[in-house]
Amino acid sequence: MKCAVLTGGGDCPGMNAFVRAVVRSTLNLSPESSVWGVLDGWRGLVYNEYRPLNKRDVSGIAALGGTILGTMRFPELATSVELQERAARNLEEQGFDYLFVIGGNGSVKAAWALEQILRREGWRTRILVAPGSIDNDVCNNYGTSIGFYSALERSLEMLSWIRDTASSHRRVYLIRSMGRDSAYLAFYAGIIGGAEYAIRPHEEVDFERLAELAAQRDRDTIIVVAEAYPKSLREIQQILEGIFQRRGIDREIRTVDMSYFQRGGRASVTDILRASWLGYRMVCDALKGAPSGFYTAYYIGHEQEPLPLELAADDARTSHLDIPASVIRMAIALR
Ligand code: F6P
C-alpha cells in the first residue's frame, strides 16, 4: 500500500499521535508499504509537497502539540473546484491508495469534495478521516474530536489561575474561549472550571440575571464567553458595569482571552490514546480495502462503523452550534 497522511485546518494536540500511529501501523503491519507526509495540510496536497516518513521520523512525538507535518489555512480549497480537482488528480498521479486525514469541520468538507471527484473519475485513492480540532465541531453526536480534551485541560489550568486573582480582588472576570462557531469548548471549559456562567454563541443573554449572579457571589465570578458570541468582551463589560452602577453592585470587571493558549501544549492522555487507536484502526481497515469514511473518536478499543463522508460533512448532523439541553441542565444543577 502507498499512502499519505495529512493534518488539516487548525493544529491541535493529538495530531502527532495520529501521524505516528498511521506511520508505525502501516510499516509494521505491511512492511512493503510506504507512507508519505503531506506538508502544510491541504495546501501541500494541491502543490504536491510530501516527504517520506519512516518509523524513526515519528519517534517521541505522540504527546507533542502542533503537527510535525505542518498545516496552513487554505480557505480557497472550499470554493475552488479547480483546486479540488488538482488535489484529487495529484492523489491519483502519485499513486496513493489511501489518504489518512486528521482535521476539523473544514477538512471533512474538503475530503468529501475530493471524494466526489475521485469517484466520478474512477480514480483509486480512498480517504479516511479522523476528527481533530479543539472546537469539537465535527460530528459530535458520535463522539468528541481529538484535541478537544487537551484544550479543556489547558482551559482548566488557566481558569484556575484567574480564579486566584478574581477571588483575591472580589472581581468579575469575562473570559473568552476559542471554538469558532462551536459552543462546546467554552461551555465545557465553564463546567470543568466551575464558572458561574458560560455564554453560548447564539444565546439571548439576560444581563440583569448575570449581574444578579455576580451580586450573589461572595468574592469571585467567572463568566466564560464563546468565541462566536457576537458581542466583544468590552461590550459585555460595559453592559454589566451599567447594571452594577444602577443597582449599586460593587464589583470590578476584568477581561481575558484564553485564545491560542488553549490550542497548544501537550496532548492529554485521552487524545493520545484515541488518536493512536483511530490511526491504527484506519490502517487495519485500509489494508482490507475499506471505502472512504469518517471515523468518530469515542475511546480506545471502540469498533464503530465509519460514517460515509457525505453524512460527516453535513453540518445539520454535527449540532455543534449549541449544547444538548441535558448538558445545559447539568451545568445549571452544578452551579
Ligand atoms: O479551529 C481551531 C481554532 O483555534 C478556532 O477555535 C479558532 O476560531 C481558529 O482556529 C483560529 O484560527 P487561526 O489559527 O487561523 O487564527
Image (cartoon, rainbow, N blue to C red):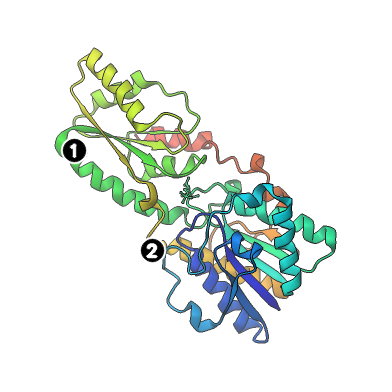
Horizontally, is 223 left or right of 51 in the view?
A: left
Horizontally, is 261 left or right of 59 in the view?
A: left
- The outermost residue toward the top is 246
- The outermost residue toward the bottom is 32
| Amino acid carrying mark 1 in the image | Ser
Nearer-the-camera pick, 82 or 275: 82
Answer above or below: position of 74 versus 324.
below
Q: Residue at x 35, y 46 (%)?
A: 258
Q: Residue at x 50, y 30 (%)?
A: 202
Corner quadrant of residue 6 = bottom right
Residue 320's disc number: none
Corner quadrant of residue 66 = bottom left
Residue 288 at what x, y percent from top left? 74, 74
User: Looking at the figure, which quarter contains the C terminus?
Assistant: top left
**Distance from the alpha carbon under mark 1 to that under mark 2:** 28 Å
Horizontally, is 225 left or right of 274 in the view?
A: left
1 or 2: tag closer to the N-terminus: 1
Whether label 1 lies within 8 Å of ligand 1 gets the answer no
Whether label 2 lies within 8 Å of ligand 1 gets the answer no
The answer to whether residue 129 of the structure is visible from this angle is yes
Nearer-the-camera pick, 325 or 122: 122
User: Looking at the figure, which quarter contains the N terminus?
Assistant: bottom right
**Local secondary structure at mark 2:** loop
Q: Residues within 10 Å of mark 1 (few under 14, many from 20)?
A: some
Give the labeled residue for mark 2: 266
Answer above or below: position of 219 versus 192.
above
Give the labeled residue for mark 1: 167
Answer above or below: position of 285 versus 31.
above
Answer above or below: position of 181 versus 271.
above
